[in-house]
Amino acid sequence: MTLTEQMTRLAKQAKAASRELAKLTMAEKNACLLAMADALENNADALKQANALDMEVGTKLNLSSAMLDRLNLDDKRIAAMAKGLREVAALPDPVGRILDERTRPNGLKLQKISTPIGVVVIIYESRPNVTADAASLCFKSGNATILRGGKEALNSNLLIARTMIEAGRKTSTRFPEHAIQVVPVPNREAIPALLSLTQYVDLCMPRGGEGLIRAVADCSRVPVIKHYKGVCHVFVDADADLKMAEDITMNAKVQRPAVCNAMETLLVDRAVAEKFLPAIGKRLAEKHVELRCDEAALGVLQSAIGNRQSAIKTAHEQDWFTEYNDYILNVRVVDGVKAAIDHINYYGSAHSDSIVTRNEVCASQFLAEVDSAAVYWNASTRFTDGGEFGMGAEIGISTDKIGARGPMGLEELTSYKWIGFGNGQIRT
């Protein structure tokens, strides 16, 4: 069987499964999700064994320590996957909601009803927990999903999906066998082959680095919801609580530097730079964060902490546009909130940006004028996440302006149709 034939078979199976999924009741879907959560926890040892094989592959591929961290599955992350499934089960069913209702002068009654999208392809790198998150959200919203993870996570992804499918089939006789499928081959050519099948595939959502997302968007013939990269900022205003600013900066940068909502550039108001930068510089140095600075920040940091514990370098123009996904941070001194906004809107990726200040006027200006999917006042950018937003597990984050924007959960995985109720009306 050729690669194109393999992808066509997957897509056809998914389309047929999507028709059956649409018939499941909320109770049936929730029971399956709860059984899947239990199965993941009960199968933890096997999942960790499969993941160990993937970690070996990742090491041979020379993945960075941050990327290996994303790949790793331990008891905590397996428990988090199960918790995510239970949270999705507890959420309201997004299908069948009446979004709009009106009666026309001729008596024709119209309802706008939420419906599943159909077949959703998810393409992602490294993080095997995405397999459970994406599959559960698609399942709850009545969509069949085809999952294409990286070759470094193939063993983990296949076993997570198989565990979920087996639990679903044991729980409900109406569970469609092909509701959740993993592309079983690592060939890159599988992606354009799959995304050319517009008669079967309804939507693609890539998750990963900018290179992957651009490659998917360029080759796809089906609609793609995406964000290219996460160049996120924290701006420390002149009126900031500097201890709060330190804590937010550290959380935004070093808690998990390899994720898209981690901060890549720290902007500091000139009025507090000489007080704030030495303190935060020392804390970042303890975490071995490399600092790439403009001239003003470079002078303050070098005189305060030197270059003993942390690499302190001059930032170049391209650095301000860069998503590092690593222990590297740009630092720039700016003259007030307007300069910070201008920097973010020019160099940022419209993902997540934050201001730390006690000045409500400055905060309001920042929130209104920064053109990003998520904008925060006195909070870390790390909150841009479906789980943190109360959506349950997350299907992805969009920086597009048409359709979904920001973290995407169940509601963003539905479309709608109009239903008309008449009693013989004809158009004249």
Image (spheres, grey):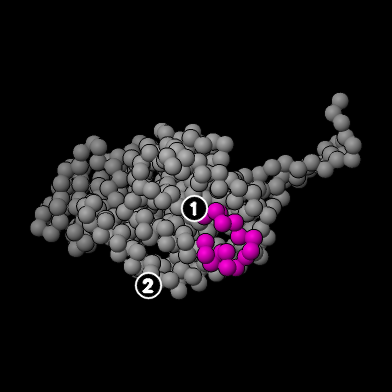
Amino acid on which the number 2 mark rests in the picture: Asp
Q: Does residue 295 lie above or below 309 as drawn?
A: above
Give SS at disc 2: helix
Decide which of tag 1 and tag 2 comes sooner along the chain: 2
Splitting the image into 4 quarters, where does residue 109 fall?
top right
The x, y position of residue 413, in whole percent, is 56, 49
Outermost residue on the front side: it is: 1
For the residue pair 220 and 84, the one nearer the viewer reads as: 220
369 left or right, relative to 321: right
What is the C-alpha distance between the residues marked 1 and 2? 22 Å
Q: Residue at x 21, y 61 (%)?
A: 287
Q: Residue at x 52, y 55 (%)?
A: 180
Give SS at disc 1: strand
376 left or right, relative to 233: right
The x, y position of residue 362, in whole percent, is 42, 48
**173 within the magenta span:** yes
Picture disc at residue 45 = 2
For the residue pair 409 and 291, the one nearer the viewer reads as: 409
Assign the N terminus to one quadrant of the image.
top left
Q: Does residue 127 lie above or below 46 as drawn?
A: above
Residue 269 visible in the shown view: no
Picture disc at residue 181 = 1
Q: Does residue 102 lie above or below 90 as drawn?
A: above
Q: Residues within 10 Å of mark 1 (few under 14, many from 20)?
A: many
Q: Which residues are magenta?
A: 165-180
Amino acid on which the number 1 mark rests in the picture: Gln
